[in-house]
Amino acid sequence: MRLGFVAIVLCGLGPFAVALAEAQTGNNDSDLLAMRKSRDSADVPTLRKAIDAAHQQAQQKNTASAYEQLALLNSWLCEAGHGQNDDKVIKQAAEDGVEAAKKATELDPKSSEAHRLEGDLLGQLIPHVFAGGMRYGRESTSELEKAIELNPNNVDAYIARAVSYFYTPSAFGGSHEKAVEMLKKAVSLDSASDTAHIWLARVYLKDNKRNEARGEINEALRLNPQRGFAQSVNKQLTAKEKQEKAQ
């Protein structure tokens, strides 16, 4: 698709939509960085505009990469929804993201990232639908393990699998120990992944390992001080630390 045509399609959708159009012509890294900032600040309206643009492009291009980008933006909208404490936003973004990711895996069954996004977004959907774990838990796990099988260096797939281990009850295969193992693997592949450090902090905090949690969240904030998710975990940890000192 030519940029001129994309610009017409995206007219009126705002700067992030224009950035998305440019991303399709080779400026992907800088423009995705801009969209990540919208995720970090929980800017739901801007992400929605970008998603509208991405949806139109995916329909026009009908490629796995276009649907992957649409699914990715929806996963970021899920995080923004958490930042706004808006379950309706999270549920809709997860449902739309799963649909886009499924389309991507149909178009390219060997895409590790497409399978990762499908598994991740199914996991995001689980708490927001009736019997979500029973309906989507096994499928989510299968997709994430497929993503790792297809690309053993897919950092985000290890993180998503760790989150699954973290939230799944032990009776159904959940394990904080395995979550930490997966997250450490992610860090070994990319030490600059603030997401991996944030989730390590969350697991350690849940397990009352305050020192380890503090080290991880400090690293996450060093890497990306503007991310609302990291700031939220830091507030939880700080509250626990203050509570301990007061005792």
Image (tube, rainbow, N blue to C red):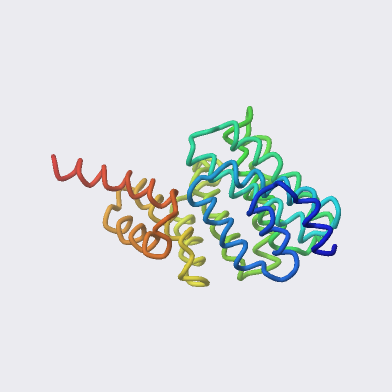
Q: Quadrant of the N terminus?
A: bottom right
Question: What residue sits 80% from the left and 63% below the top?
Answer: 3
Q: Position of residue 67 (x, y in %)?
A: 76, 54
Placement of 228 over or under 132, stated as above or below: below
Placement of 197 over or under 125, stated as above or below: below
Please tell me in which quadrant of the rendered image residue 223 appears. Answer: bottom left
Q: Position of residue 126 (x, y in %)?
A: 61, 37
16 or 94, nearer to the observer: 16
208 or 14, nearer to the observer: 14
Specify whether 148 is left or right of 212: right
Q: Residue furthest top?
A: 130
Please tell me in which quadrant of the rendered image residue 32 appears. Answer: bottom right
Specify whether 95 is left or right of 247: right
Question: What residue sits 73% from the left and 59% below the top?
Answer: 21
Question: What residue sits 38% from the left and 50% below the top?
Answer: 231
Specify whether 132 is left or right of 66: left
11 or 157, nearer to the observer: 11
Question: What residue sits 65% from the left and 40% below the top?
Answer: 93
Count of residue discs: 0
Q: Position of residue 172 (x, y in %)?
A: 56, 41
Q: Quadrant of the C terminus?
A: top left
Placement of 61 over or under 46, stated as above or below: below
Q: Position of residue 40 (x, y in %)?
A: 49, 52
10 or 95, nearer to the observer: 10
